[in-house]
């Protein structure tokens, strides 16, 4: 039911009318006893469906000052990061007993009430990083018995109470990085109470690390991050860290002089990984450290130390026989000499990325018989270094971000075990068939961001095991027939950002396993896109043709639909064609795609669809046609795709969503219609989408009147569908409500209007009818009299201002039946004998003038009105009217103008409707002809007296006073 009866008012407004307050109270009560809570949240968004056991609620970056109250109880993961929350209060997380992960990082929290988290009994991760906490009080983490990860990094923590961590039985990871603890003893309590595995206390101003400060018995800590502390000494004097696995001392120490004091080599006997990047230690001290760690260390990071130190330390490090991984990033190394890594015999992973290498000695890696991974990315190599040619154990070679401009035929000739070869972002202008011919096991070849112009004859009889070929960002123009012929294992082929305008028939022949092909951002036109070019891609599941130059001037059938040879295709993207969009999608464009699940056609400048467009894609599950110019869509378009689950229609200039009503989209669960032109969401539309779970109308404005009343009501109470950001929807109409929030409108007002309006009006109608017939039955005469009284009143008002000079002495009002008496008796006596000037209707009324006007003029034009009353007179309509007008003159001018002359005795009750007349009669102020009998002289005399009475107040001079008084 649509209704535009009234505008709703703003709930905070002040202009309630009395009845609406009453009705509103009624309805509010009705709503309060049904405390259903809508699924749409005021500030947050629910990810996953309502019934999902992993409900995530996202409230990040919402400028929140406090924790929202409407968080669903079933929430498992809650993100409140990047807001302006300053404190956490006791009841903020009441009842969220299913919560497992809570992220409150990047707020301004400086205070947390005691036991604020006590309801979060299953919480596993709590992130309070980047806040303003100062002190960790005793009962802060009360109840968090299942908490395993606690992040408190980057706060202002100075004090930790002794029992803060007492109940955190399950705590595994604690991050206190970037606080102001200064003294290590402050973290002792956490190690005392918990089974902590990882402790991050970087950047806390510690100047000493002494094992007795953290514990006096051995603890199970596996990871200890002490980086960026200005430590003077790192001292371990007892075996308190027997399980320590990873120690991070990067950037610690001060003035280049940190001391390492671990007298017993067995104390850190389990340490596998050590980070000494940028450590402030003397070279001598560092070599002592490295020499002392030869029992277990397998991974060593020596970054940010400078070329000189590396030159001095690398060999020492490599003497650690257990060492397998060495990272030497950011050391400004320009060359790798033959000597540098000579003793690194056991290395399997070597990372020299992010240096300034231009040259590597041929023998640099010759001692490394087990090297499998070599990272030389982000250097200045202009060719594949000879040093890599003979590392036969190598499986991963990373040469990204260098300046290699040419590949030599033997660069990879002996690297037969290579599986990953990354040459992304170099300056390669040419590749040849021989370049990769020996890479029998290669799975991934990344040649993206180079300047390769053609693939002709490159991939012939080689790379049979290649699964992933990345060629994005090159200068390829043409794909020739057979270019990829031998790549029978290829699953992913990336060709975006090239200059491809021609793809020959059979270009992808042989790619029988290809699942994903990306041809986005090339120069292909509607002419170059043909069915035959995709021949052989029988396994292809995903094809991206966005950002090309495909354009169709009309949507009529194509002679040869382009995708008819891609039976396995599940995803097709044709969005954003250049420069003016695709304009039309031909009716059989999707022919053959019987398994298509997702079709993306964003930003194509399409105005309308051919109704048969989706006839061939019965499985379609997701359709994105945002950023087009539809204004309207037909419901028939969707009939062939009843399985549609997701529909993206943002910025499509839609005037209305009514096409969804008959569209039969019974399985649609996700609808995104941001920024369109419709302003009303109707109930019928929503009801036609029974499976809708997620409705995204972000950044929309609405008409804020009762036409959206149902929608507002639905958003706030619906528990199956989430309307994202609903509480931020604003009004654009009426202008006076511009900027107001849609959900602040008082919709009860509207429902009252519809329901109560009909109720009240029909009730009133019934009551009036009853009353009317009742009155008519019992008080018929009174009603008739009242009616005349009213009419007379109207005439009188009309006459009121017209003061005529009296033309006549008396107007004689009589009925036709009594005319003989008037003419024979009254007229001769009054006009003849007494000399009055009378007004008689048959004689003096102006012909052609409406009779009512004549009557009124006659009465007002005469000083008196003589009513000749008989039974006929009382029954006559006109005569009654004459009496009424005269009565009103009496009211109006305060003059009694009536002279009643009864021609016969009239029973009282027949007079009764004529209230005023009855009153006069009761006062005996009337003349009676029958009673005059023989003495007509007295009768006429009385009449003369009555006519002579002039302009006096009625009360003082009752008209016929003294006349015929009994
Ligand atoms: C600890 O905090 C630092 C600083 O915020 C951060 O970079 C690091 O990733 C955190 N580590 C863990 C395991 O939380
Ligand atoms: C490949 O290795 C063989 C023997 O190990 C050697 O003779 C040959 O010269 C190497 N080829 C290149 C290009 O280094
Ligand atoms: C609507 O869909 C149902 C099943 O999803 C189907 O039975 C019915 O025929 C469809 N109606 C129209 C008009 O396509
Ligand atoms: C949703 O609301 C309906 C009534 O509107 C109620 O019957 C149903 O139990 C509610 N479902 C949930 C999951 O709250």
Image (cartoon, rainbow, N blue to C red):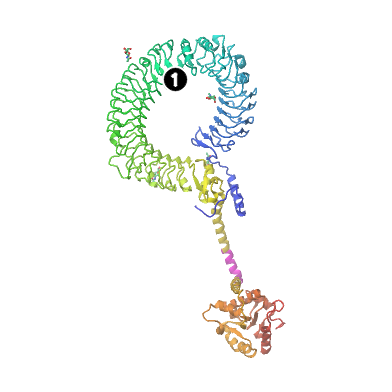
Q: Position of residue 666 (x, y in %)?
A: 43, 42
Q: Quadrant of residue 163?
A: top right
705, above or below 455, in the image: below
Q: Please tell me whether residue 403 is drawn above or below residue 740 in the rendered image.
A: above
Disc 1 under 8 Å from ligand 1? The reply is: no
Residue 188's spot in the image, x, y percent? 62, 19
Q: How far across and down, in percent of the image, does residue 576 sit?
A: 38, 39
Q: Magenta region, mostly helix, strand or loop? A: helix
Find disc 1 in the rendering and name its residue: 355
Q: Between residue 630 and residue 820, name the one nearer to us.
A: 630
Give the side of residue 152 with respect to residue 1, left or right: right
Q: Is residue 952 left or right of residue 652?
A: right
Of 421 and 486, the residue lying toward us: 421
How crowded pointer 1 is (Cα within 10 Å; few <14, some 14-19, many 20+) is rated as many
Helix, strand or loop status at disc 1: loop
55 to 639, vertically: above or below: above
- Residue 875 visible here: no
Residue 138 vs residue 903, the one in the foreground: 138
Q: Which residues are magenta?
A: 769-782
Q: Position of residue 157 (x, y in %)?
A: 61, 25
Residue 772 falls within the magenta-colored stretch: yes
- Of residues 132 and 715, the one nearer the viewer is 132
Task: Please tell me whether residue 762 belongs to the stretch shown in magenta.
Answer: no
Q: Name the quarter where the C terminus is drawn.
A: bottom right
């Amino acid at each position: 039911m649509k209704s535009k009866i009234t505008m709703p008012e703003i709930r905070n407004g002040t202009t309630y009318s009395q009845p609406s307050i009453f009705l509103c109270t009624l309805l509010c009560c009705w709503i309060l006893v049904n405390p259903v809570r809508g699924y749409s949240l005021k500030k947050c968004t629910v990810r996953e469906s309502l019934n999902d056991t992993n409900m995530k609620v996202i409230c990040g970056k919402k400028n929140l000052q406090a924790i929202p109250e409407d968080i669903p109880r079933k929430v498992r993961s809650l993100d409140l990061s990047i807001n302006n929350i300053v404190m956490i209060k006791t009841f903020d997380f009441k009842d969220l007993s299913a919560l497992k992960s809570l992220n409150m990082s990047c707020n301004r929290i400086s205070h947390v009430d005691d036991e604020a988290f006590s309801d979060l009994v299953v919480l596993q991760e709590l992130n309070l990083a980047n806040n303003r906490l100062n002190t960790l009080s005793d009962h802060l983490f009360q109840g968090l018995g299942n908490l395993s990860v606690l992040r408190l990094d980057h706060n202002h923590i100075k004090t930790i109470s002794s029992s803060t961590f007492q109940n955190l039985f399950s705590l595994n990871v604690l991050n206190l990085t970037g606080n102001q603890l200064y003294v290590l003893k402050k973290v002792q309590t956490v190690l005392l109470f918990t089974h902590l595995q990882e402790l991050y206390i970087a950047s806390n101003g510690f100047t000493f690390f002494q094992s007795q400060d953290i514990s006096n018995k051995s603890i199970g800590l596996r990871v200890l991050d002490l980086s960026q502390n200005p430590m003077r000494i790192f001292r371990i004097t007892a075996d308190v860290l027997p399980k320590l696995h990873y120690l991070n001392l990067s950037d610690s120490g001060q003035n280049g002089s940190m001391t390492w004091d671990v007298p017993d080599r067995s104390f850190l006997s389990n340490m596998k990984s050590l980070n000494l990047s940028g450590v402030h230690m003397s070279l001598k001290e560092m070599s002592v450290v490295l020499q002392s760690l030869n029992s277990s260390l397998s991974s060593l990071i020596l970054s940010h130390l400078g070329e000189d130190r590396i030159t001095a330390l690398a060999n020492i490090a490599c003497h650690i026989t257990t060492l397998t991984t060495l990272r030497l990033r950011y050391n400004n190394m320009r060359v790798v000499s033959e000597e540098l890594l000579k003793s690194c015999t056991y290395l399997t992973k070597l990372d020299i990325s992010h240096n300034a290498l231009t040259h590597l000695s041929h023998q640099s890696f010759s001692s490394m018989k087990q090297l499998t991974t070599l990272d030389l990315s982000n250097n200045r190599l202009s060719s594949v270094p000879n040093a890599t040619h003979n590392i036969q154990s190598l499986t991963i070679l990373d040469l990204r971000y260098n300046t290699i401009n040419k590949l030599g035929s033997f660069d990879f000739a002996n690297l037969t075990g290579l599986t990953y070869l990354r040459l992304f972002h170099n300056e390669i202008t040419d590749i040849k068939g021989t370049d990769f011919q020996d890479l029998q096991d290669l799975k991934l070849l990344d040649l993206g961001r180079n300047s390769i112009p053609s693939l002709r004859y490159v991939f012939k009889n080689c790379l049979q095991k290649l699964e992933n070929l990345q060629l994005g960002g090159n200068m390829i123009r043409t794909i020739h027939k057979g270019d990829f012929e031998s790549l029978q294992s290829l699953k992913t082929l990336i060709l975006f950002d090239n200059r491809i305008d021609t793809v020959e028939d059979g270009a992808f022949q042989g790619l029988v396993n290809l699942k994903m092909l990306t041809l986005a951002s090339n120069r292909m036109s509607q002419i170059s896109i043909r069915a035959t070019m995709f021949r052989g891609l029988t396994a292809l599941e995903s094809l991206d043709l966005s950002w090309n130059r495909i354009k169709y001037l009309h949507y009529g059938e194509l002679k040869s639909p382009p995708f008819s040879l891609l039976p396995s295709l599940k995803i097709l993207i044709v969005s954003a064609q250049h420069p003016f969009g695709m304009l039309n999608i031909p009716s059989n464009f999707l022919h053959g795609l019987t398994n298509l699940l997702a079709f993306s056609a964003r930003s194509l400048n399409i105005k309308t669809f051919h109704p048969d467009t989706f006839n061939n894609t019965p499985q379609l599950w997701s359709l994105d046609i945002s950023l087009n110019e539809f204004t309207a869509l037909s419901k028939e378009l969707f009939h062939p795709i009843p399985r549609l689950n997701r529909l993206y229609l943002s910025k499509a200039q839609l005037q209305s969503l009514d096409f969804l009503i008959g569209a039969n989209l019974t399985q649609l669960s996700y609808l995104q219609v941001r920024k369109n032109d419709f302003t009303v969401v109707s109930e019928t539309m929503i009801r036609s989408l029974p499976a809708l779970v997620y409705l995204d109308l972000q950044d929309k404005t609405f008409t804020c009147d009762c036409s959206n009343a149902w929608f507002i009501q639905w958003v706030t109470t619906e528990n199956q569908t989430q309307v994202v950001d609903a509480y931020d929807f604003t009004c654009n109409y009426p202008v006076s409500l511009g900027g107001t929030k849609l959900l602040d409108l008082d919709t009860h007002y509207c429902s009252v209007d519809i329901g109560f309006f009909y109720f009240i009006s029909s009730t009133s109608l019934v009551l009036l009818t009853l009353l009317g017939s009742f009155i008519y039955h019992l008080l018929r005469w009174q009603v008739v009299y009242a009616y005349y009284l009213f009419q007379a009143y109207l005439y009188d008002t009309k006459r009121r201002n017209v003061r005529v000079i009296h033309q006549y002495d008396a107007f004689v009002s009589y009925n036709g039946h009594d005319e003989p008496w008037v003419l024979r008796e009254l007229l001769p006596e009054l006009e003849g004998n007494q000399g009055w000037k009378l007004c008689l209707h048959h004689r003096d009324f102006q012909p052609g003038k409406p009779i009512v006007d004549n009557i009124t003029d006659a009465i007002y034009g005469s000083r008196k009105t003589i009513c000749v009353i008989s039974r006929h007179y009382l029954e006559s309509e006109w005569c009654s009217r004459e009496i009424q007008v005269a009565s009103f003159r009496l009211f109006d001018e305060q003059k009694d103008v009536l002279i009643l002359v009864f021609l016969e005795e009239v029973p009282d009750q027949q007079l009764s409707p004529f209230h005023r007349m009855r009153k006069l009669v009761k006062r005996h102020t009337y003349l009676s002809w029958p009673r005059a009998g023989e003495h007509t002289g007295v009768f006429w005399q009385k009449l003369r007296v009555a006519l002579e009475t002039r302009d006096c107040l009625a009360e003082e001079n009752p008209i016929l006073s003294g006349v015929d008084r009994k």
